[in-house]
Amino acid sequence: MGASAGGHLATTLGTHSEDYSSIKDNLDAFSFHPNFMVLISPVITLGKFAHKGSLDNFLGKNPTQNQIDSFSNENQVTTTTPPAFIVLAQNDPVVNPINGMLFYQAMTEKNISGSLHIFPEGGHSIALKNNPKSINLWTTLCEEWFSDLSILDKTKTEITPNKNNFLKANRF
């Protein structure tokens, strides 16, 4: 799961195969490739619709075109890219929602399962709860998507505050 610049990190893990962190220890045996991605107002592209702050912080003030292309993750989608649930707000003043649309388009071209949701309001502050208007539905839609992909078996999951001690003690 990644939001904003964390969405770029999540899509980098989902689209790049080279393990830059490999140090020849026991952890190298574990895949860093996620099984799915949940992307909220994600930074995806470092090209025309890039979030300038993310571009500068990640690649510096004068990146090469090759660097920009390599880390514009819509360009890196392959048949091994995991499914993604993407949530965007049309009125996001920070990260242009076209970032998520470009990623979804690339996924569609590679026949990767995905779910794209663009809400009219939400700005750059989409939260788990208490969002304005219709964007508050995104968590329910995501839960249904998890069920569709058999990631979540709702027949075996109890997430009601009355019966779940974690939810009673840890209100969001």
Image (spheres, rainbow, N blue to C red):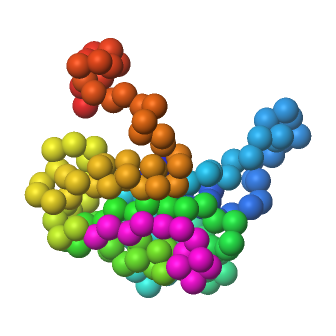
Q: Residue at x 38, y 69 (%)?
A: 116
Residue 172 to residue 49: above or below: above
Whether 25 is among the magenta residues is: no
Along the line of sight, the residue nearer the viewer: 30 or 61: 30
Where is residue 89, by image quadrant? bottom left
Q: Residue at x 20, y 62 (%)?
A: 123
Q: Is residue 170 visible?
A: no
Residue 156 to residue 148: above or below: above
* Residue 75 at x, y percent in the picture: 60, 79
Q: Residue at x 15, y 60 (%)?
A: 134
* Residue 9 at x, y percent in the picture: 54, 56
Residue 97 to residue 132: above or below: below
* Residue 168 at x, y percent in the picture: 26, 18
Whether 110 is among the magenta residues is: yes
Residue 130 to residue 165: above or below: below
Please state the extent of the stretch shown in magenta in the rendering.
107-118
